[in-house]
Every structure is written in C-alpha cells, then in structure tokens.
C-alpha cells in the first residue's frame, strides 16, 4: 500500500495514544484473538486517513489495532498515486455501468447492507485476511450481511509477500473465509497486490520474485477452491513490481484500481478489466466499484461456468 505520512497536528494526541496502545495494549488483544502481527511488521506511525474512517463505536484499543493491521483495499494506492480526483454522484453511478458494487474492510465496522442494496449495490467484496496474522473482526457481519440482502459477494486478502509464501497466505485466506462455492452468489477470492505499507514498495522482491510469489498464491488458491483468484492492483504498482515477469491474463480476472473517470492503461498482458475501483467514497460504504458487464455475466463469474 503506502508508506505512512505524518498526521495533521489536530490528531497528534490520538497518534500518541495509538502508538502507546500498540505496545502496551495491543499485544494482549491480538494474542487473545490470535491475530497479532510480528513486532517487525508494525508500522512506525499511523496513516491519518484511516483515523478519519474508523467506526467511532470501536473501543480505542481495538481501533488502534485495526489501524495497525487492517489495510483497506487501495489505501496504499491512494497514498502513492494520489487522492481520487473523481468524486462520483448518484447520476454518475448510473451512467458508469449497470452493475455497481463496493468493497469493505474492518474500517467500515457493521455495514447497513439494506441501505447499500437500496442505493443500487449488487455485489460486495469483503476483506477477510492480511498476511498470515490478521483476520477482519467484522467479516461475518459483512460477508453474511451482503449475502442476506441479495448481493453476490466475495472475500479478499491483502498480500504481504515479504512475510510468508504465496501458498501459505492462500491457505490462511481460504481457511478464514476466502473460499468459493458454485452457488452463483459467491465470487472467486481476490489477492490484493499493492504498495507495501511497512517498507520497500515491492516488498524487497525482484520482478521475477514477485511473479513467483503471485504464482504460488494463485496455484494454491486454485488447488484449494477450483478457481484462480481475481488479481487486484494498479497499473503503476504492477509495472514497477511485476512488469512482464508474469502473465496472469489467461487465468485471473483483473480488478483495476484507478480513481478517475476512465480506467486508463491496464497492466501487462490484460486486454480488459473485470472490476474497476474508481473512487474511495460515494453512495456506498467503502470503495466504489463497477463490474465490466451485465448482471448475468456477474452471475457467470460467481458460478464458475
């Protein structure tokens, strides 16, 4: 995702509290939940936008833990590649495509799914895991809630290629909500590949090394579920960290992140996109997305045939 910025002065006291909690309170919370990341994986500062989006009902120790470990899809891309310049309105949403959707993480807390459905969302992706150390504490409410109102839903995994193998993270993902079933209501899982929130942009890997990691994740996910994962990324990150070292266009649907009125150039080898994350706020909770096709094609993607 992105390196951390200094927060505005008005949040300095909250930063100090969160930093203190990360050392004094979070270990006990994370240990009990079996979710604590190794100390070396903790960021040195908090990203201010996450603090803006925290559910105020989350107790402060848990809020600090979520900030430290729950990286929302696209958050690092927004920091590295700029804030969305496109702020869609309701009329724009209708014009973009017939199938609109959303993605959420622990930052959204308990989602009002009925309201999202009434506003036109027909699919949702929910963060399940990150690395092999974090599970979204709101996953059940978000994943089951979207399904219960009639949405086609799926799960995503925030990749940490610098911590464990792709296969190990695919297993962790599948074991904690990232599976798939041919019920026409469950989308294939997503591997979220973007800027490193804790250090080197490409997680210390060469392009060949990153392609090897993606292949490891992809093949294990296919073995476990029968489907290849959707790949979420931005063209800029993929060009820098994978480039032409790996071609997944024949197996993995592309979910492109670009916060603008057009998709722009796609990553290497993909000639079309399946999902487009075009804004980080709008009429739905979380990020705003579109499916590149009619609703019946979304059903086919979920069903697998």
Image (cartoon, rainbow, N blue to C red):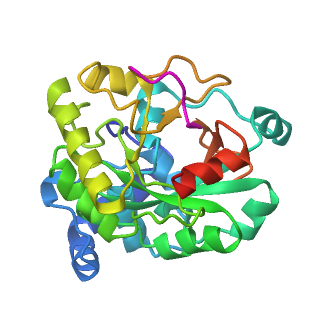
List x then y, in percent, for residue 191.
37, 47
Please name the residue shown 34% across and 70% down the image. Answer: 176
Asked whether 283 or 129 is in front, the reply is 129
Tag count: 0
Q: Is residue 26 left or right of residue 233?
A: left
- In this rendered view, identify the residue nearer to me: 3 or 105: 105
- Location of residue 190 with respect to 82 vertically, above or below: below
Taking the spot 36% from the left edge, 49% from the top edge, the residue there is 46
Residue at the right extreme, as displayed: 91
Q: Is residue 209 above or below residue 74?
A: above
Rendered image quadrant of residue 202: top left
* Outermost residue to the front: 305
- The residue under the point 40% across, 64% down is 179
Q: Is residue 272 magenta?
A: yes
* Main secondary-structure element of the magenta-colored stretch: loop
Tell which of 180 and 265 is nearer to you.
180
Q: Position of residue 68 (x, y in %)?
A: 33, 57
Q: Quadrant of residue 117?
A: bottom right
Residue 203 in percent (x, y) is at 20, 36
Residue range (magenta): 269-276
Quarter occupied by the N terminus: top left
């Amino acid at each position: 995702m992105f390196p951390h910025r200094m927060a505005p002065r008005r949040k300095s006291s909250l930063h100090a509290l969160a930093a203190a909690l990360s050392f004094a309170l979070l270990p006990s919370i994370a240990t009990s939940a079996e979710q604590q990341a190794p100390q070396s994986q903790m960021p040195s500062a908090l990203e201010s936008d996450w603090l803006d989006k925290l559910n105020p009902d989350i107790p402060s120790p848990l809020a600090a833990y979520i900030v430290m470990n729950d990286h929302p899809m696209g958050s690092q891309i927004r920091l590295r590649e700029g804030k969305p310049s496109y702020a869609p309105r309701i009329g724009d949403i209708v014009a973009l495509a017939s199938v609109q959707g959303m993605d959420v993480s622990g930052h959204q807390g308990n989602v009002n799914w009925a309201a999202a459905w009434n506003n036109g969302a027909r699919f949702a992706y929910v963060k399940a895991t990150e690395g092999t150390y974090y599970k979204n504490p709101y996953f059940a409410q978000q994943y089951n809630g979207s399904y219960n109102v009639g949405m086609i839903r799926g799960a995503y995994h925030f990749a940490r290629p610098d911590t464990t193998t792709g296969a190990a993270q695919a297993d962790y993902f599948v074991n904690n909500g990232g599976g798939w079933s041919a019920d026409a209501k469950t989308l294939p899982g997503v591997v979220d590949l973007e800027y490193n929130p804790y250090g080197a942009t490409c997680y210390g890997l060469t392009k060949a090394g990153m392609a090897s990691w993606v292949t490891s994740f992809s093949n294990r996910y296919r073995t476990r579920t029968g489907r290849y994962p959707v790949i979420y990324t931005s063209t800029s990150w993929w060009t820098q960290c994978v480039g032409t070292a790996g071609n997944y266009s024949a197996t993995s649907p592309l979910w492109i992140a670009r916060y603008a009125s057009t998709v722009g150039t796609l990553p290497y080898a993909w000639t079309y996109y399946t999902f487009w994350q075009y804004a980080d706020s709008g009429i739905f909770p979380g990020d705003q997305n579109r499916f590149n096709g009619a609703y019946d094609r979304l059903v086919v993607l979920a069903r697998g045939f």
